[in-house]
Amino acid sequence: MARLSLFLPPFAGDYSGACSVLFGMDCLAVIVDAGCCTRNYVEYDETRWLGSGKSAFSAQLRTLDALLGDDARIVEDAACLARESGAACVALVGTPVPALVGMDLQGVAAEVEAACGVPAVGVSTTGFETYESGVAKALEALLRRFALQEGMAGGFGDEDAGAVANEVSAGCLMSGDGAAPADIAVAPSVNIVDASSADIAETSSVDGEAERLCRGREFLPAGDASYGCDLKRAETPAAAASSRLRVNVLGATPQDFMGAEALAELEDGLRAVGLDLAFSTASSYTPADVAAAVRADASIVVAASGLPAARLLRAECGVPFVVGRPFASEDFERLAECARHMDRSGRADCARRAKAARAAISKDAGFAERAVLSGEEGAAVPAAPAARTADSLSGPVAQEMAVSEGENVQNVRKSTGLEGDMLLWEHRDAREHRGAFAALPAGDAANRCFTMNTQVTAEISGEKLPVLLVGEQVAMNSLRPHVCRMLQRAGMAADVCVASFFAWEDALAEPGDVRLRSEGALQDWAREHPNAVYAGDPLLRRIPEISDAPFFALPHEAVSSTLFESYDACRSGARALSELEAFFDALERERAGQAVLSFRGSSTLLG
Amino acid sequence: MSKLVRFMPEKRRKKARLRIPESHALYLCPNACGRRQGIRLLMNDQADHASFLTFSQADVVLGDYLAQIEDAVEEVVTRVRPRVLTLYVNCIDDFLGTDAAALVDGLSARFPDVRFLLSRINPVSEDVAAGVGAVAGNAQAGLYAALEPSAVCDAGVNAVGAYVALPRECELQDALSVAGAGPLRQLPACETFEEYARMADSRCTLSLSSVGDAAAADMEARLGMPWMRWHACYDLDELERRYARLAELLGGPALSCTAYRARAEGAVERARQAVGSLPVTVDTAATFAPFSLACALLRYGFDVHAVFALHTKAGDEDAERELVQRWPHVRVLRQADCRLQRDFGIPQENLAVGADAARLVGSRFVLDMYHDEGYFGFQGVERLMDDMARAVRTGAGFHEDEEGLLQNDGLPDDGAHGARAGGGASVRASTCGDDVRVCSGIEEACSAGEGRPCAGGRPDARGTVGASGLGAEPGCRPRSTGARKEA
């Protein structure tokens, strides 16, 4: 369904998200467009140009190229430039016209690679989707090219293994409209599993698989050890237990973390709590780092855009993941605690489940065509065959998963001592939460991991102030407990909900949360909640129903580009929390008649 | 030769965007395609004049988008009530084959109080469009498609092809006065729809750049208005010749150029002393006519080392030939030469006229002139020379910002370099040089956000020189029949 925007600009496109993922690598990014798409990314959706020497190239696609399917020129150009530049990788990134004419970018990438010998990937972005879809596609392309591609064939041991791998992965990807994928039943937002002796054995097999993956990397330039996995460094469980945890950081792009500084803060924060980074797109990385992703102890998903990659790594390599965006130092600590707990046992559990899922799928003679929704519900475009995802499984496999997830939650609460405190985010109201669970289908155990720490807002009574946090779902979810505590300290009874225009996971949502399909949906919500308080991108104030409401500005690059870049500098990480606390204090003083605040008026930018 | 084009950011530059007064734009496109327009409109404080209907892939494949357009138009018309509603479609529409005429006719019948236009932002069609810059030219032409034939023919003169108004102090106004012509009518200076509509009353049109030629040709074809090409020019002799031809076109006395020329020559001399033997580079960010500018500077005695012809426009070919023949030592660098960072063999101790050359070479002295904005006629030469001299004199203190972009320190408070009336340039030195920005030739179509009309009045883009171009018959043009409709 088309989306009419009268007040907000179109959001960062999927190819921008893809290019931002590739930015950290020595990658020749070629956007297959006529020119404007590249300009969209370069001028409005990338913030890290300082001293990088990076760039993006436009293929200068023209009508006859597209109509006649003449890819030869693009292949030749990209191969030529790849040779000249000495890039470690070539990426062909899709835009609307290639999507419309059905250009096979993966195929073109293969031709480029054959022509110049430089590893190449095709990222089938379309320009119709928003950034998080492109981030997911680029991460998948990188993982398949540098971490999974050769290994999968040996890993499964049958001739259809490659196809199976593709099917499984496709099922893990978010659908184009950002709807929660069907595998959510096995993809809890906080993937915490318990360890058992049986799991240890599985862990060993996982390491064995990782070894096979490494050995399968015959595409690597001869003698270039930097591309491959260092088998000597492959850790045994025992070794891992004594060393720092190595994690992947998935979903870290400037669309959600404004500028290199915010991304560096994220990485520094994780390192400071004892985590080593295996594969992270937040800063520079190499193909070897991508390859190392399969051997990470866990993945940390800092934005919803990283979820599909996390699922892929879990499904294929048993790398567990945890979801959350840290704002304060204690958030980093908790993330690290979760990741440590998952570590080996989590990996084993995931590996077991991944293996079970693959086994079940491979037994199925035929894979049903899956319609990938590229826009809104009901509008289906035939897509490549995709996997029957894990939630479509029934019987013992599904039961095993459900039991496992349920146990995991209990175990982590015991073992981490996090009980009674938020893990990554929390429910607003325990009673509402329980009510919501009553309506959930039996066996939807994944959601149980959200049952922690709901007492903060549960103690608040009386008429509640509607507070809507509008932004990226994981970020706003992670911000929510902080907001709840601030409101509690301010003595305000509030109903804190999350809303997002972007990738949406129902399993990560709480009752009252809103997936926004258009700005009209936000207008509707605002009309239903006339006294609401908002936190979100400043451009939201262009919406008449919100313009006069109490509003805390949290610039989101995917919405407002760098229009509020300087403003954002003081509103990232812990600084956002202190500013937010001051905001709510001021708001409460106004409500108590002790101060008069004016939320009216707008800057020139806001028109 | 590889056609890949390297892009580097230039978001600090507040690029002007033309619009018909009291009009509203509705962009019909995939989400990502509208991104640049949306942010730029916000930067330019024009966001209230545009809306976006972003399609999903399914909408396009299943054809649902047509019905959705009608619904969206209804909502926009109800809310905004514009005099003109321009529907912008982009590259994908070239492949969808939308019956644009039927769409516009249907909407016009449904909303009779609104004038509907359809414009295309379709750089993908550059290979099938006629002539270099035809896509951008057609984009400009679309801005004048709402002009209706007028029974009135006054002494007004239109100027098209620029994104900012000509500077008030330029001698063109004097030339028009001497010839008994005027006022000078320019879209960037129009504040009401009525002012815009009166452009149809004008006697003739000046096309200030290659992207204005199609608009001028269209107005000649539809409104019977002769036109004259007056692309960027920094050569004093040529300027004198142009004023003489303008007088012929207007049918009045010619401007006496002596005083204006003397002032410009004085500025040339001052600049030459200030710049001395410092190497000079010129680029296509600074001017639509880099070869003409380079030739002029060489004739004035400047030591031009290179022309960075990264995105050339039509109309500068003769100057390019002259440069190659007369000054073969001057390097001409094109996109393919600049895709990868490398040593250009040009000393950093140079004066770069244009930000592209400054970034490529790492020039110490920079005159951030942009697309000739603010430089016209003798006044333009005088101003250019003064700015070059100032760039060298005030060499210290200029820097890249935190993103490696040149900061517009030399601009007035409005910071809207290139967007304010009269345009202008900032002057500074730079410590940069590791970035390359190469624009494509279709940038204008995109940045202006305007397109060509879909039906009726589609300009003949082949005629980059209009039938009545420089050789137009002087005097008042023959009038078209038919009165102007009330908008």
Image (cartoon, rainbow, N blue to C red):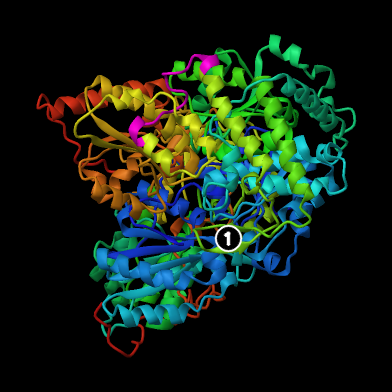
**Considering the numbered disc 1 on the image, is that residue within a helix, a strand or a loop?**
loop
Residue B98, can we see it? Answer: yes
* Quadrant containing the C terminus of chain B in the rendered view: bottom left
Q: Residue furthest left?
A: A593
Question: What residue occupies the far right of the structure in this picture?
Answer: A222
User: Does B67 sit left or right of A131 as displayed?
Assistant: left
Q: Of the residues shown, which amino acid type is indicated by label 1?
A: Asp
Q: Residue at x 53, y 23 (%)?
A: A410
Q: Count neighbours of disc 1 (C-alpha within 10 A) and say few if under 14, some if 14 to 19, many if 20 or more.
A: some
In the picture, residue A348 is in which quadrant?
Answer: top right
List the single residue furthest toward the top: A242
Asked whether residue A429 is drawn in magenta, I would say yes
Decide which of B463, A181 is in the foreground and name it: A181
User: Which portion, as a residue range, is magenta?
Assistant: A414-432
Residue B449 image-quadrant placement: bottom left
- Residue A387 position (above or below residue A433): below
Determine whether, in the image, residue A155 is placed left or right of residue A607.
right
Main SS of the magenta part reads loop
Give the image location of residue B483, x and y in percent: 27, 87
Q: Of A399 and B13, which appears nearest the observer?
A: A399
Q: Nearer the viewer, residue B174 or B439?
A: B439
- Residue B300 in view of the camera: no
Residue B11, position as x, y percentages in the image: 46, 42
Q: Count numbered badges in the picture.
A: 1
Q: Position of residue A95 (x, y in %)?
A: 60, 55
The residue depicted at 85 percent of the width and 28 percent of the height is A224
Which residue has dot 1 on it?
A: B316
Disc 1: which chain? B
**Based on the displayed image, in which of its 4 quarters is residue A297 positioned?**
top right
